Amino acid sequence: MTVRAIVTDIEGTTSSIAFVHDVLFPYASERLPDYVRKYCDAPDVAPLLRAVHRMPTLRG
């Protein structure tokens, strides 16, 4: 079996919750839109975006 992804929970584990909330979340929020625009058609990203779009709780 090939490992394709590792899911980790870093909040409070590798750094303080405040650091995650005050630094990492804003960092990701700033960069995520450009990343999605740039890689939306990539074979590894497109199916994930479609899956998220189908999630009823995330639709606007």
Image: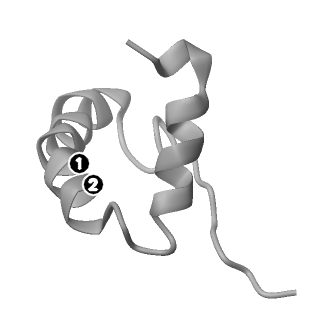
Badge 1 vs badge 2, beta-carbon distance below 8 Å: yes
Residue beneath the point at 27% across and 54% down: 36
Return the residue nearer the eye: 54 or 23. 54
Tell me where residue 26 sits by quadrant: top left
Measured along the vertical axis of the image, is residue 8 above or below residue 27? below
Measured along the vertical axis of the image, is residue 42 above or below residue 7? below
Residue beneath the point at 19% across and 45% down: 33
Q: Position of residue 24 (x, y in %)?
A: 24, 43
Lateral position of residue 1 relative to residue 21, left or right:
right
Q: Outermost residue, bottom direction?
A: 2
Q: Position of residue 7 (x, y in %)?
A: 62, 56
Which disc, if any, is residue 32? 1
Task: Give the number of the mark in front: 1 or 2.
Answer: 2
Residue beneath the point at 33% across and 60% down: 40
Q: Quadrant of the C terminus?
A: top left
Q: Which residue is mark 2?
A: 36
Q: Quadrant of the N terminus?
A: bottom right
Q: Position of residue 57 (x, y in %)?
A: 56, 14
Mark 1 residue type: Leu
Return the residue nearer the eye: 14 or 34. 34
Q: Secondary structure at mark 1?
A: helix
Mark 2 residue type: Val
Return the residue nearer the eye: 14 or 46. 46
- Coloring applied to the structure: one colour
Marks 1/2: CA–CA distance: 6 Å
Q: Secondary structure at mark 2?
A: helix
Lateral position of residue 36 relative to residue 15, left or right:
left
Q: Position of residue 30 (x, y in %)?
A: 11, 42
Tell me where residue 35 sits by quadrant: bottom left
Mark 2 Cα-neighbour bin, 10 Å: few <14, some 14–19, many ≥20:
some
